[in-house]
Image: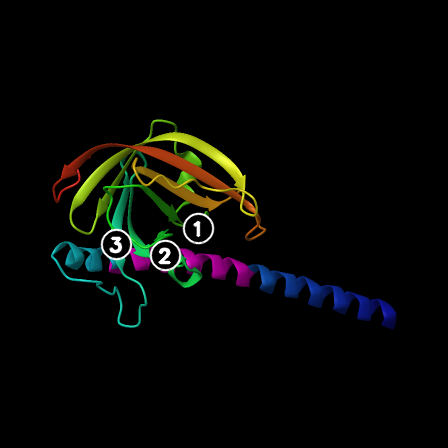
Amino acid sequence: MKGRQIKTRVVTILAYSLVLVGLAQACSGAWIYMKAQLAQVLLQRAWAGTLAGQQDVKPWPWADTWPIARLIVPRLGIDQIVLEGAYGRTLAFGPAHVESWSDAREGTVILTGHRDTHFAFLEHVQTSERIVLQSSNGLIRSYRVSDHRIVDSKSGRIPLDREHPALVLVTCYPFHTAIPGGPLRLVVTAEAEDIEVERKVRR
């Protein structure tokens, strides 16, 4: 009888432990999502200052990054501020530029973001999808998605074309998995259309 009581107590403790772990993970996921959304509000303010001519506008006093572009996917309702430097601490707050930024006029622009927050929309991007990128000088360029590829991050390479403008969006793959990281990446390539020099993005 005593042994059965001990066994029941152990099972009960394990059950409560699993529930607590599940709640902790759920809260952690919710916090990551909320942080990402709040960051975009602050980044929108910093972006307004950038377009007004201010240099390297920090979205919050302790930030070690700043907005360098605005990414829009009209059909999906995506409107995000892109940060300088594709580091873990940067990607927690928004999509980021992989290399040092000049502008959107020349060469291949590579942006990366997390599959469960800012770049979750890539799961729904279609061929010929229109994507708009605005640089800090107000230059706006439209792109059309031309290719989707799954590559291994250990062996796959993204070619950089310095003469023909293109936009490459990269995120971890597959979507909706409980396993973080992994070697696979979804690479979405979009070819440049016409440049529009204006402050307002046409929908």
- Relative depth, front residue between 190 and 132: 190
- Earlier in the chain: of badge 1 and badge 2, it is 2
Range of residues picked out in magenta: 23-42
Mark 2 secondary-structure assignment = helix
Do tag 1 and tag 2 residues touch (Cβ < 8 Å)? yes
Q: Dot 3 corresponds to which residue?
A: 68
Q: Distance between the residues labelled 2 and 3?
A: 17 Å
Position of 41 relative to 6 (above/below): above
Q: Dot 1 corresponds to which residue?
A: 114
Question: Alpha-carbon neighbours of circle 3 within 10 Å: few (<14), some, or many (≥20)?
Answer: many
- Amino acid at the residue labelled 2: Ala
| Mark seen at residue 98 | none
Residue 68 appearing in the image: yes
Q: Dot 2 corresponds to which residue?
A: 36
Mark 1 secondary-structure assignment = loop
Q: Where is residue 101 in the image (x, y as percent from the top left)?
A: 29, 53
Question: Alpha-carbon neighbours of circle 1 within 10 Å: few (<14), some, or many (≥20)?
Answer: many
Question: Alpha-carbon neighbours of circle 2 within 10 Å: few (<14), some, or many (≥20)?
Answer: some
Name the residue: 41% across, 34% down. Answer: 124
